[in-house]
């Protein structure tokens, strides 16, 4: 057991079983403030399940998940979002018929009540935040374009922007560069290195070149357990990791 006070997120002895199959088994994972952690591992290693557990989509069978020292294992998905955890799934879920501006605008948290959502004006604060976020995600020149016309990579950036405008303390991204061009991957690495300045980020990724360009620390999962953890160079040199993963 570790003293949690230093960590933004602490998973301790976390297990989850689906129909008797242990998808995650006695997992310990600690994420520091301002850290960019990449989780890698072969298919079926439990990577997406770990994100599902953190954001409350899947309930754990045993163990503890603390965010800012607060136990969140019984919280609903909505409450976990309100605490400051943002999650991007593999498929972008943007509003294709709205403009880039409108997509960012409706993601801006405003009191989060129904009346707040119905009777609000476009304030200067919202407009400023939209422009600032659009700049960060390389879309400031496309604010008036319908989101459906964006390239695949730009749609991924827009969805990251829709999370950023909510200012989460922890951002979780599931394979953010899948299907992107080489140029878009490089820009996404640039984007994540900016995003990290005031929050922590967990990324699940298969693209090793991309992982090398962003990761502070890498966690390798295998069969629901942590196989290795450390800096990318150490991970790449680790014979066990090479055997289960990098050799394929």
Image: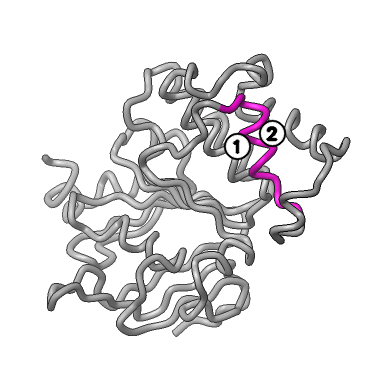
Mark 2 Cα shell of 10 Å, populated few (<14), some (14-19), many (≥20): many
**Mark 1 lies on residue:** 161
**Mark 2 lies on residue:** 133
Cα distance, mark 1 to mark 2?
Answer: 6 Å
Q: How many tags in the picture?
A: 2
Secondary structure at badge 1 equals helix
In the depicted view, which residue is nearer to us: 132 or 28? Answer: 132
Magenta stretch encompasses residue 108 = yes
Residue 143, disc: none
Residue plotted at (85% across, 40% down): 125
Q: Residue 100, relative to residue 39: is it above or below? A: above
Which region of the structure is painted magenta? 98-110
Residue furthest to the right in view is 124
For marks 1 and 2, the one nearer the N-term is 2
For this view, does 29 lie left or right of residue 124?
Answer: left
- By secondary structure, the bulk of the magenta-drawn segment is best described as helix
In the depicted view, which residue is nearer to us: 124 or 60? Answer: 124
Expressed as whole percent of the image width and height from the top left, the position of residue 230 reads 39, 55
Secondary structure at badge 2 equals helix
Residue plotted at (64% across, 44% down): 107
Q: Residue 198, relative to residue 70: is it above or below? A: above
For this view, does 49 lie left or right of residue 120?
Answer: left
Magenta stretch encompasses residue 37 = no
For this view, does 138 lie left or right of residue 247?
Answer: right
In the depicted view, which residue is nearer to us: 245 or 156? Answer: 156
Residue plotted at (13% across, 52% down): 244
Disc 1 to disc 2: CB gap under 8 Å: yes
Expressed as whole percent of the image width and height from the top left, the position of residue 174 reads 38, 46
Q: Residue 202, relative to residue 134: is it above or below? A: below
């Amino acid at each position: 057991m570790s003293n949690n006070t230093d960590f933004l997120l602490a998973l301790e002895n976390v297990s989850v079983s689906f129909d008797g199959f242990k998808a995650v088994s006695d997992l310990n994972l600690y994420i520091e403030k301002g850290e960019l952690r990449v989780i890698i591992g072969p298919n079926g290693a439990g990577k997406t399940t770990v994100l599902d557990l953190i954001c409350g989509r899947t309930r754990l069978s045993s163990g503890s998940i603390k965010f800012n020292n607060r136990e969140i294992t019984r919280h609903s998905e909505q409450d976990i979002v309100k605490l400051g955890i943002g999650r991007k799934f593999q498929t972008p879920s943007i509003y294709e018929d709205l403009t880039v501006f409108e997509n960012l605008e409706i993601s801006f948290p405003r009191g989060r009540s129904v009346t707040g959502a119905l009777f609000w004006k476009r304030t200067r604060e919202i407009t400023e935040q939209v422009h600032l976020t659009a700049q960060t995600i390389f879309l400031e020149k496309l604010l008036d374009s319908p989101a459906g016309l964006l390239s695949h990579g730009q749609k991924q950036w827009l969805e990251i922007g829709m999370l950023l405008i909510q200012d989460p303390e922890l951002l979780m991204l599931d394979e953010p560069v899948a299907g992107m061009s080489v140029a878009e991957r490089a820009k996404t690495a640039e984007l994540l290195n900016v995003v990290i300045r005031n929050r922590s980020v967990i990324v699940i990724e298969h693209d090793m070149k991309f992982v090398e360009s962003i990761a502070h620390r890498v966690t390798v999962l295998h069969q629901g357990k942590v196989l290795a953890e450390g800096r990318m160079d150490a991970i790449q040199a680790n014979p066990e990791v090479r055997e289960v993963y990098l050799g394929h």
